């Protein structure tokens, strides 16, 4: 019961990040790009750090060196790849992307809703394993969601949504994470060790997001000063996850 409460509180905090886009409206385009580039770099470090410093060690400690662990991690990668193909997730972190349109905005909301649902599942499954893993997974989701939500907010504004409507729709989409938590809680009644399947899928999902979504965004910036900024962001993200080992 306590873990369920932690999960619900965590996803509510994550969902509130959907409102962060409005804070960046006064910034100039170039300043916003620099901030987003650093946030994407930081998220990359946090996601990789969570996978290799927390999730995988915890998984192997609980389940040993079994081939099904590797298959579940690969399954997580394939799951996120499949969903991205099916729903055509729009993971652009630049509010000025050329592809923005009303149809892209609609698909973005649908895809983001599914993404947030999965975030809720991953967070709940991690808290079922232990409190520290729940916190690190929540931080990893938060780190990725901040630049993502800034981009999503920009998509909706560019498609003609008012600020209030963009914030409202983004927040409703974010609340899908609550549904993910509730599904895990209900399934756990039938399958008590459900988190043993969720954790490897979480690792696979984070590897996919960091490797296929975030890293390509970073390669778009070629200026040496931006590269240094990215190295710093990735390093800080990994250091944060390293510091969390003592939690």
Image (cartoon, rainbow, N blue to C red):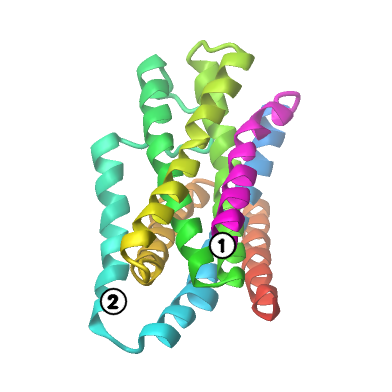
Residue 90 numbered tag: none
Q: Is residue 61 left or right of residue 144?
A: left
Quarter holding the C terminus is bottom right
Percent coordinates x, y for residue 236 in the rendering: 68, 65
Q: Is residue 13 left or right of residue 90?
A: right
Picture layout, residue 113 above or below residue 133: above
Residue at the outermost right position: 26
Q: Which residue does the numbered mark 1 point to in the structure image?
A: 3
Q: Does residue 90 show up?
A: no
Q: Residue at x 40, y 67 (%)?
A: 195
Quarter holding the N terminus is bottom right
Res 12 quadrant in image: top right
Q: Residue at x 67, y 73 (%)?
A: 244
- Please state which of residues 20 and 238 is positioned toward the viewer in this rendering: 20
Q: Secondary structure at mark 2?
A: helix
Picture layout, residue 118 above or below residue 199: above
Q: Residue at x 24, y 38 (%)?
A: 86
> What segment is highlighted magenta in the picture?
1-27
Disc 1 to disc 2: CB gap under 8 Å: no
Q: Residue at x 63, y 15 (%)?
A: 164
Q: Is residue 240 found inside the magenta-colored segment of the image?
A: no
Picture layout, residue 93 above or below residue 79: above
User: Is most of the magenta stretch helix, strand or loop?
Assistant: helix
Residue 70 numbered tag: 2
Q: Is residue 77 left or right of residue 215?
A: left
**Disc 1 or 2, which lies upstream in sequence?**
1
Using the numbered discs, state the Cα–Cα distance from disc 1 to disc 2 in whole angstroms. Answer: 26 Å
Q: Does residue 105 show up?
A: yes
Percent coordinates x, y for residue 168 in the rendering: 57, 21
């Amino acid at each position: 019961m306590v873990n369920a409460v932690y999960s619900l509180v965590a996803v509510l905090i994550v969902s509130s990040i959907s409102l962060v886009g409005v804070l960046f409206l006064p910034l100039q385009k170039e300043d916003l790009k620099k901030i987003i580039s650093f946030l994407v770099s930081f998220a990359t470090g946090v996601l990789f750090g969570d996978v290799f410093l927390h999730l995988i060690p915890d998984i192997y400690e609980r389940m040993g060196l079994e081939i099904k662990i590797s298959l579940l991690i690969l399954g997580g990668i394939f799951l996120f790849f499949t969903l991205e193909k099916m729903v055509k997730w729009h993971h652009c972190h630049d509010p000025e992307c050329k592809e923005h349109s009303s149809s892209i905005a609609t698909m973005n909301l649908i895809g983001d809703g599914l993404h947030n649902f999965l975030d809720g599942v991953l967070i709940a499954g991690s808290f079922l394993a232990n409190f520290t893993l729940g916190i690190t997974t929540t931080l990893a989701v938060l780190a990725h969601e901040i630049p993502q939500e800034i981009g999503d907010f920009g998509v909706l504004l560019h498609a003609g949504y008012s600020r209030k409507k963009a914030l409202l729709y983004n927040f409703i989409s974010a609340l899908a994470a609550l549904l993910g938590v509730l599904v895990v809680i209900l399934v756990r009644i039938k399958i008590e060790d459900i988190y043993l399947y969720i954790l490897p899928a979480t690792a696979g999902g984070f590897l996919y997001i960091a490797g296929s979504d975030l890293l390509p965004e970073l390669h778009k910036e070629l200026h040496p000063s931006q590269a240094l900024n990215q190295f710093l962001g990735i390093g800080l993200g990994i250091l944060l996850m390293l510091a969390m080992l003592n939690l």
